[in-house]
Image (cartoon, rainbow, N blue to C red):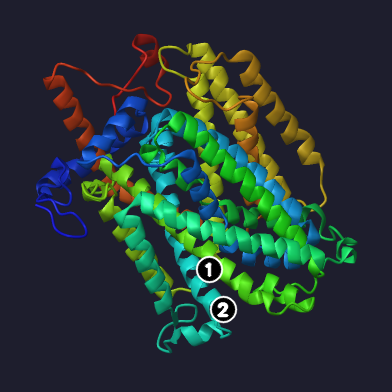
Amino acid sequence: MRRRGCSYIKQPFLPEDSFRSWGNYVNALKQTPARFMNQVLTRSGDQAELEAKYRSQHEMKKTLSSWDLMWFGMGAMIGTGIFVLTGLEAHTDASPAVVLSYLFSGISALLSALCYTEFAVEIPVAGGSFAYLRVELGEFVAFIAAGNIFLEYVISGAAVARSWTSYLATLCNQNPKDFRIHASGLAENYNQLDPIAIGIIIIICLFAVFSVKGSSRFNYIASYAHLLVILFIIIAGLINADTDNYCDFAPFQAPGIFKASAVLFFSYAGFDAVATMAEETKNPARDIPVGLIGSMVITTFIYCLLALTLCFMQSYKEIDVDAPFSIAFQSVGLGWAKYIVAFGALKGITSSLLVGAVGQARYLTHIARTHMMPPWFANVNPKTGTPVNATVVLLVATAFVAFFTDLDIIGNLLSISTLIIFMLVSVALLVRRYYMSGVTTTADRNKFIACVALMLGSSIGTAAYWGISEDGWIGYCITVPIWILATAGISVFVPHAWDPKLWGVPLVPWLPSASIAINIFLPGSIDRDSFIRFGVWSAFLVIYYIFLGLHASFDTVKEYENKNYAEGSKVSTAPKFASVAADNKNGHANPSV
């Protein structure tokens, strides 16, 4: 049975055996420890992830080229961050050295993009980092990471939608509060209702639901207009530059630069949405590297130019934190330019919302294919070739948050989630290259585990020392050499267990190791309250996994195994780090889909 809009299939929302009756569910809960150990110690396989897409009833249409992916990546990243965060961080933390903050964040994001690219080429599915982590680090780690990706998409989408209202007000020469409804009965930070944000999300939803190619064309138009505005800002701004504004380049020194870099990393969040479109790419081996890496390099270059322009136009002490470029142009006698800035921001915000909507739906679709989320979300509409159910539900959640919530306090939380996920993908790439059950010997496996542990420990130590020590340097003399030795140990003493067939990250293990170190280091500049929020959300994800996701996934694995056994084929996959006995015996442990 099919209805208009969200597709409808006559089956339970939770169709797995564990949820067919209360008795079944109670029995499943009693088996939670055994099931948890079974699932957490197993990994999926490349082929299993590729085959999972057939559970969506209909395949997504392969319509995207490298050009599409590049514009999608730029559309996802060049949004509100550059127009708001640049002024905030230049004024409060980094001064004119904010350009170095953008550069450092860009290098970190580029290293992560390289790791994403290798996975996306080899495993071209809609699951993005969830699929990559499930293959290499197991489904538990993958699910916790995916849950934080959802948090990033929903909250950042809501923040971007509300900022759409703010820039529309600027374009109309009005105060943003005039476009919102004040609800006196609601708590502070939740009482500025934003119906315009709901409206723009509905429009974005229609584009994302009806055609990914149509979304790409819309993104082209919006991005072209956006780049023209950016070009105007750079040329007009540099013509009115005052070099004296750069005399005091870095008064806050390194602490201010890196603190700003941690916050500005949010401006690069969104490139991972391109990886989720691999399933709809015509030629993943050719198109994904060009699209992903190309969009990252161009975006970093644009960010640095805009940061330079802003600080050349106006002293960092006078930069307005709410409308930095508009006020900067006004200060040099070009007040009319604020309308052009607002127009460009609206175009960038719209592109960011659209790419976020497309990417988050594909994450949810692939997770639902594993049944860790209800499989209803995995349905792909046969006419549009898009995951309608997942798109609509996630955008409804985004609209709900955008309607009520002032999201000023969420930026750091989003950066933490993103940085930790990117770090895990880099670890997963090292596991993929250097550990394969049945190929890697016990001695090599133990050396690899020891080196990775030292690499992670030294990176955490560096970040912690940075956070608690203002002027100290002795700690770095210990942690940095340990990181170098650990990375060199993998390079020299652990042989490759697998080499990429189509496209691979160069200079392994050094580039993934550098990505791990930077992605761990940057959160060391983020406030404690953001880590508390991150911990609370992650705890909620663990509870959901233990009481729902674990049992649904376990039943799906068993059903899949029984089906293959009945067909005369036995499917099994390797554990994350199986026991020595299991490795020596048969090279794999408990199977997983």
**x%, y% of residue 24?**
12, 44
**x%, y% of residue 464?**
67, 47
Residue 180 located left or right of residue 23: right
Q: Are marks 2 and 1 in contact (CB under 8 Å)?
A: yes
The residue drawn where x is 75% and y is 54% is: 99
**x%, y% of residue 454?**
62, 29
Residue highlighted by disc 2: 171
| Dot 2 crowding, Cα within 10 Å, few <14, some 14–19, many 20+ | some
The residue drawn where x is 64% and y is 56% is: 264
Residue 2 located left or right of residue 270: left
Q: Amino acid at mark 2?
A: Leu
Check the image and report above or below for 83 versus 498.
below
Badge 2 element: helix
Residue highlighted by disc 1: 346
Badge 1 element: helix
The residue drawn where x is 30% and y is 24% is: 590
Q: Which disc number belongs to residue 194?
A: none
Residue placed farthest to the bottom in the image? 184
Which of the 4 image quarters holds residue 484? top right
Q: Amino acid at mark 1?
A: Leu
Q: Earlier in the sequence, mark 2 or mark 1?
A: 2
Which quadrant holds the C terminus?
top left
Check the image and report above or below for 195 versus 178.
above
The residue drawn where x is 57% and y is 57% is: 78
